[in-house]
């Protein structure tokens, strides 16, 4: 946690000073009480009190109130400062973890579910906030009370102090051991909570499907089971902490009773005054309370340590896509020519089969190339590699002659506009969703892109036009409308390389032709790769690449390929000769 505390070391120091001040005041209070009792209520009323520097009973009370007031001020200022640091550190930690997670490659999200990330981002940081924002201060205060109280006890009676000290050490050992256990169990319980969130996150995104297959009951049970599991682990943790509490209360009460007993005997002997006994009890209570709080805090700290472990895993996660240490500039940044040189690729999560097998392709500036082939042939994979979501297993992909691994990720992706197979809509209005392609674009540029993608046509019929909120993940749009927004976004981006992954698959034939016209305009002067199942949509491209099982099986113009008797001719026959 230190790197996160360092920027606020001024505040931390201030909190420390306030803490010392407050604890100091607390330590003086028992002495003031001693004087009050001995001089105020005893025969020697109105005698001089060296401690408070007062001569009269009224003076004693005034000074006591003064002390209480200083204490109150110091405590409240300390509370504010420490809470501030706690909130600040939590916010920073959240942002840092979020920033780190956003940079991870898709491989990362294949193993870690988003619900799990969210749970760490909220639940675990809240635990840490409790510790930084209060527990640590409580612990330090108790430590001061403990040390100060011990010193005062030692000054009064060294014999008593030694007994106390031995007792404390005996009690500290099991407390530390139990604390370790709490840390382990806390981590487990946070893991279980995250599992439940991950499950809920996935299912909540698919409620209509759950209902259509009437699986509500099963899903409810699945979640209940998961919640039950986190309950069981939480209870295991709580049981250990409960044992810790029993130990602590025994220690606290034991110490107080012990000191009372010894003190009462001494007052009886006349070797101690009533006031001394009163201050004695207060110090003993301070010491015992200090130990108790420290043990509680220790439990909290160990709980937070479990949470920190989980957060640090995210904070130190390395993306499997490593940026070049000294990125090379892209030659001819306004254009895009692509070269696949004997590219082979296996998905990290499926090492045994090659998704792409020895692909060599050369795509010139401004060329439009269609990728066709059966489902699972590896077409989308080719796009993923171009965007460097994954790195090739073998071979090289070059953009304008430069190995894409030598470019900065920003520069590479800046040159690519993609319409993915599943159009993604953010929970914002239509205007902002299109503008996502180029945040600095002017309104009229957004409208032009919208017209080209035929978005204009349906947006103008929405209640608030471009300001209409589209719902989370675009739930308030039809599939074809979502697709057109995604196309408008890509057109607006105005990048030299355009990747269309079945960009018009959800459109009716008439809209498809219209959107195609918009796309044709956007393709002018750009290098375009189009994945399409409907061959009619790719009859105007320069070249068609036919893929099957991760290999390129044919390439040529649409007319050439139809004349051959390969896969394309077969597919074309099925589609065109109805
Ligand atoms: N993240 C992944 N991890 C492991 N295997 C994957 C992953 N994504 C895709 N695959 C596999 O890689 C192969 C190629 O998938 P790809 O998505 O490139 O097919 P496609 O040609 O785009 O198919 P479609 O036309 O259905 O979209 C498939 O067999 C698929 O199961
Ligand atoms: Mg695909």
Image (cartoon, rainbow, N blue to C red):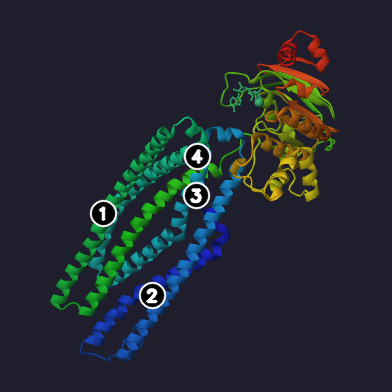
Query: Observer-nearest residue: 531 or 412?
Result: 531
In the figure, 273 relative to 177: above or below? below
Q: Residue furthest left?
A: 268
Look at the image and tell me whether residue 356 can be seen: yes
* Of callouts 2 and 4, the N-terminal one: 2
Locate the C terminus and report the quarter of the image it occupies: top right
Q: Are the residues at dot 3 and dot 4 in contact (C-beta closer than 8 Å)?
A: no
Query: Within 10 Å of the Cα at label 1, are there few (<14), some (14-19), or many (20+) other Cα atoms?
Result: some
State the CA–CA distance, disc 3 to disc 4. Answer: 18 Å
* Of callouts 3 and 2, the N-terminal one: 2
Q: Which residue is mark 3?
A: 122
In the figure, 303 relative to 268: above or below? above
Q: Which residue is mark 2?
A: 25
SS at badge 4: helix
Residue 204, which numbered label? 4
* Of callouts 1 and 2, the N-terminal one: 2
Mark 3 against mark 4, which lies toward the viewer? 4
Query: Within 10 Å of the Cα at label 4, are there few (<14), some (14-19), or many (20+) other Cα atoms?
Result: few
Mark 2 against mark 4, which lies toward the viewer? 4
Q: Residue furthest top?
A: 565
Instruction: Give the quadrant of residue 45.
Output: bottom left
Please tell me which residue is depicted at 43% across the width and 40% down the height of the picture: 196
> x%, y% of residue 568?
74, 14
Mark 1 against mark 4, which lies toward the viewer? 4
> x%, y% of residue 469?
64, 48
Task: Name the quarter showing ligand 2.
Answer: top right
Query: Observer-nearest residue: 222 or 98?
Result: 222
* Of callouts 3 and 4, the N-terminal one: 3
State the CA–CA distance, disc 2 to disc 4. Answer: 54 Å
> x%, y% of residue 491?
77, 38
């Amino acid at each position: 946690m230190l790197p996160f505390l360092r920027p606020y070391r001024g505040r931390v120091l201030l909190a420390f000073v306030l803490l010392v001040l407050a604890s100091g005041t607390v330590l003086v209070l028992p002495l003031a009480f001693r004087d009050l009792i001995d001089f105020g209520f005893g025969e020697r009323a109105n005698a001089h009190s060296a401690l408070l520097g007062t001569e009269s009973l009224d003076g004693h009370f005034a000074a006591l109130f003064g002390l209480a007031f200083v204490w109150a001020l110091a405590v409240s200022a300390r509370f504010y400062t420490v809470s501030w640091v706690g909130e600040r550190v939590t916010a920073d930690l959240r942002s840092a973890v979020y920033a780190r997670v956003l940079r991870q490659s898709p491989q990362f999200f294949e193993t870690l579910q988003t619900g799990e990330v969210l749970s760490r981002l909220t639940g675990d940081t809240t635990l840490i906030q409790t510790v930084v924002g209060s527990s640590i201060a409580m612990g330090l205060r108790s430590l001061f009370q403990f040390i100060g109280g011990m010193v005062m006890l030692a000054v009064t009676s060294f014999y008593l102090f030694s007994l106390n000290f031995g007792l404390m050490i005996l009690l500290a050992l099991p407390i530390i051991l139990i604390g370790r256990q709490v840390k382990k169990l806390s981590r487990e319980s946070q893991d279980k909570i995250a599992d439940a969130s991950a499950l809920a996150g996935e299912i909540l995104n698919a409620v209509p499907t759950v209902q259509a297959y009437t699986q509500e009951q099963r899903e409810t049970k699945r979640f209940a089971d998961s919640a039950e599991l986190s309950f069981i682990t939480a209870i295991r943790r709580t049981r250990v902490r409960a044992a810790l509490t029993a130990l602590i209360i025994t220690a606290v009460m034991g110490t107080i009773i012990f000191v009372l007993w010894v003190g009462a005997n001494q007052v009886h002997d006349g070797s101690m005054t009533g006031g001394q006994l009163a201050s004695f009890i207060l110090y003993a209570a301070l010491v015992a309370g200090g130990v108790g709080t420290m043990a509680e805090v220790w439990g909290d700290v160990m709980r937070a340590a479990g949470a920190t472990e989980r957060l640090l895993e995210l904070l130190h996660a390395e993306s499997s896509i490593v940026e070049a240490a000294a990125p090379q500039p892209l030659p001819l940044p306004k254009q895009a020519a692509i070269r696949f040189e004997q590219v082979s690729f296996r998905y990290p999560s499926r090492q045994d089969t090659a998704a792409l097998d020895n692909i060599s392709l050369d795509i010139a500036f401004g060329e439009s190339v269609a990728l066709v082939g059966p489902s699972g042939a590896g077409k989308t994979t080719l796009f993923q590699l171009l965007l460097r979501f994954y790195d090739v297993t073998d071979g090289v992909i070059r953009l304008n002659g430069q190995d894409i691994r030598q470019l900065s990720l920003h520069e590479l992706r800046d040159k690519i506009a993609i319409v993915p197979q599943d159009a993604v809509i953010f929970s914002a209005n239509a205007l902002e969703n299109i503008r996502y392609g180029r945040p600095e674009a002017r309104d009229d540029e957004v409208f032009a892109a919208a017209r080209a993608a035929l978005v204009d046509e349906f947006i103008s019929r929405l209640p608030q036009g471009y300001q209409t909120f589209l719902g989370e993940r675009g739930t308030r749009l039809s599939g074809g409308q979502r697709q057109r927004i995604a196309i408008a976004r890509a057109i607006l981006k105005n990048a030299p390389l355009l990747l269309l992954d079945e960009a018009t698959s959800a459109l009716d034939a008439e809209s498809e032709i219209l959107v195609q016209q918009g796309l044709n305009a956007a393709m002018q002067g750009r290098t375009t790769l189009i994945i399409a199942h409907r061959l009619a949509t790719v009859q105007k491209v320069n070249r068609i690449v036919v893929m099957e099982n991760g290999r390129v099986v044919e390439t040529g113009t649409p007319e050439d390929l139809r004349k051959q008797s390969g896969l394309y001719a077969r597919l074309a026959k099925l589609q065109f000769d109805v």
